[in-house]
Amino acid sequence: MPGTKQAAALLPPPLSELRIRRAARPLTDRWSQLPVEPRGAAQIGISFRPLQAAALGLDPDAALRTLLAYPFQLIRLSAYWNRLEPEPGSFRPDELDRQLDAAEQAGKRVIMCVGPVKAFGYPEFFVPPHHLDGPLREGTLVRPDEHRRLLEAGTAFITRVVRRYRERAAIMAWQVEHEAVDPLGMEHSWRLSEAFVRAEVDAVRAADPGRPVMMNGFLPTSAPVRLQQWWRTRDQGDSLSVAQRLADIVGIDFYPCHALASAGPLTLYLDGSRPRWPQRRRERLLDWAAAGPGRRLMISEIQAEPWEAVTTPPSPAGRAMYSCLPEDLIGNYTQCTRWSKRRGFVMDGYLFWGAEYWLLRERQGDPRYLRAFARVLQNA
């Protein structure tokens, strides 16, 4: 009988990437022993989600101050439309002003996501209700001609935000939408059309011609996700494809392991962290970036917190979740750095996803995620 690893290698891709595991794992100090790849000229940073910080029971302003004390170079912030415009005619940028002021004072560079329809951080949809006649219809492609009022309000919001902050030297790029033309997770099947997003990009460039536009997309790491993504976006391509056509900087969102369902202590995962099959989508993107000057690529999200079968990542006392252990923070970063080195080009940056979760873990007595990040900063 073949061994476990040999048997897994004989399975077709969808089966070889499935894992049934006990979700909560014993903590180890393996994170302290892994080698850290040098980053070269690339910047390292985080994304900051004030809503996630609050959901985890943290004070968002205090959480941001704590994170900014670490010696990374780049932070991604977001202008959440429904928080800046909670009522018709209002504009309340105080929270975002504080975040940007704090980042500037800490000497960080900033990528500002201006949405407006989709922005990073659950629930990823931040349109104020007064700009919608009703919920966006499932299964539809949101086109400019059919949603003219939403597009006009959204581009007006973009213009207002960009004009407010375009004199801030800390801002290095504007992000337009989040995974712009993909469906909104698994909860909604509507999608933005490329024409809708192109009008938003044009609004950013009209308001600030001097700064680059970044757009990001989810990189599938398993065969089932690759197939699902292709099927749902086959009419205009996925968000990475559209970013290649519209943006100055293409951002890759890299999540190699996530849960599908759980029952008691056991969870079913899709695990692409050790791929045995060619990652054609990734290789084509890297070939594109390496093919000529002016093609800028970054890792806009590196999985560094668990992705389990619930919205808020669990944090069991004395244990960590299988989908992202502390050592995976370093391991996922290492995978990404090696991609570009094999192609001989430099990524613009590596942004870790999950910084608010690290603070929660530290408050609960487990500093391993934060220490793993500190090791990256010290050795990269």
Image (cartoon, grey):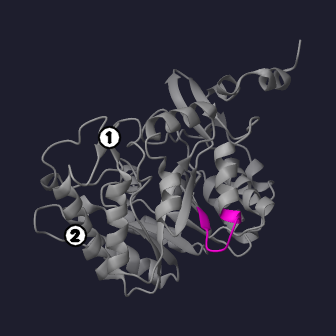
Residue 329 falls inside the magenta stretch: no
Q: Position of residue 168 (x, y in %)?
A: 40, 85
Residue at 20% of width from left, 49% of height from top? 146
Q: Toward which corner of the image does residue 69 lie, by quadrant?
A: bottom right
Q: In this view, does 256 lie to the left or right of 379?
A: left
Q: Name the residue under label 1.
A: 190
Q: What stretch is highlighted in magenta?
A: 289-298
Q: What residue type is labelled 2?
A: Ala
Q: Toward which corner of the image does residue 95 lie, by quadrant?
A: bottom left
Front residue of 150/27: it is 150
Q: How many marks?
A: 2
C-alpha span from label 2 to label 1: 22 Å
Q: Name the residue under label 2.
A: 156
Q: Is mark 1 on a helix, strand or loop?
A: loop
Q: What element carries label 2?
A: helix
Q: Is residue 89 above or below residue 276?
A: below
Residue at 62% of width from left, 70% of height from top? 348
Q: In this view, does 235 lie above or below 127?
A: above
Residue 173: numbered disc: none
Q: In this view, does 122 lie to the left or right of 25?
A: left
